[in-house]
Image (tube, helix red, strand yellow):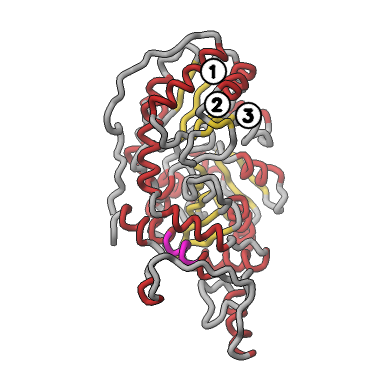
Amino acid sequence: MAGVDTDVVHGGRDDLRELGVHAPPLDRSTTYPLASLAGGTADLERLAEGEAAPGHSPVYGRLFNPTVARWERGIAQLERAEAAVAFASGMAAVTATLIAVGAIGRHVVAIRPLYGGTDHLLASGLLGTRTTWTTPDRVGDATEQDTALVIVETPGNPTLTLVDIPAVVAAAHPVPVLVDNTFATPILQRPLTLGATWSLHSATKALGGHGDVIAGVVATDQAHAAALRQVRVATGALLDPQAAALLHRSLQTLALRVRAAQANAIELARRLQTHPGVERVCHPSLPGCDPRRIVAAQMQGPGSMLTFDVVGGLEAAGAVMERVELLTPAVSLGNNDTLIEHPAGLTHRVVAPEALASANIGPGLLRVSVGIEDVADLWDDLSQAISAATGRPGGIDLPAVEGCPERVGLQA
């Protein structure tokens, strides 16, 4: 079993030497020639039943694509999973999972905070599910006879709340657990090795990393992957092959990007604590944000996301977004460049007000997806924007600290 730095470079490329190529080929076909009617019928039936690949022909591009399958193999290898199933978006992946478990039951247990779109999908009941919202220590009490799934996101979006995955898995047993692993990425956390059944990603984020692709992926075992493929075939949610090709190329630099952005986030969080215009900072590298030392127990580093509350609430938060020059005021995360957004007004706008309040997602909260720029430049821009927006000049220009207070390398 290879290490993470080898996995990201070589994952999903096992057939390239046999094909006689070095770069993964891009297959854009929408339909495929059939050697015979009987063979085509058999291949179609295999794919419709959720098999990972056709016997001979993919038949039709909505059913299977070899470029997508290569990237799926790379993600599965990185997650230490038996399989991975790719979708046209992260929300398509969430939706497919909820549909796939529907045969077991319609009840879901969920722990907030979750990404706003996931929260809305569950709270609205659009897919016929019934959701019980709970806390990590009450998961066992919240499960019912027809509970089909427990959903958790850690670190949580946007507040970076950390959840003990093995403890939730134990409390939920025998109900399977889905972990949204988008913030951590497989570089920093592998939920399946901690007992979860599904590890879900909005691949639009760090897995893509360049802000030019929308995708989702779920890593799991073969049986659950087959159920997800059945839903994908029926709903037409297969990832576009061009997007898969970009994602596969981005996979090679994932570990380098995650570690560089993480180092910047650690430094920015430390400096933000000194700014008089900032009321509160949260990043898992700060002791107050990880009192139970969950990062050390189940992660390989605190990640590249941070949040802070500015003095002056909503008006000041909006002014910070308007005054940054190097940072980009935009939703999404995991890009090479640094993004800043207002969760209550944007990514979590569809979440119920009482849920926002209980999760400490207030009007002055800003979420920063830290990129790989020079950290001194990021600090200069963020500091001046906060000073101007709050009327409280500058923070202390602390000397840089080399390294990370938690582990940043993932062992095989």
- How many neighbours does mark 3 have within 10 angstroms: few (below 14), some (14-19), or many (20 or more)? many
Q: What residue type is labelled 3?
A: Ala
SS at circle 1: strand
Q: Distance between the residues labelled 2 and 1?
A: 8 Å
Q: Mark 1 points at which residue?
A: 310
Q: Residue 344 carries which label?
A: 3
Q: Residue 9's x, y, as percent?
A: 35, 57
x, y (%) of residue 198?
Answer: 49, 55
- Residue ID for mark 2: 366
Q: Can residue 151 be seen in this view?
A: no
Q: What stretch is highlighted in magenta?
A: 69-74
Q: Do the residues under discs 2 and 1 have CB atoms within 8 angstroms?
A: yes
Q: Nearer the viewer, mark 2 or mark 3?
A: 2
Name the spot of residue 46 as percent of width and height, x first: 57, 78
Q: Residue shown at 63%/65% (left/top)?
A: 231
Residue 72 included in the magenta stretch of the image: yes
Characterize the local packing of mark 2: few (<14), some (14-19) or many (20 or more) Cα atoms within 10 angstroms: many
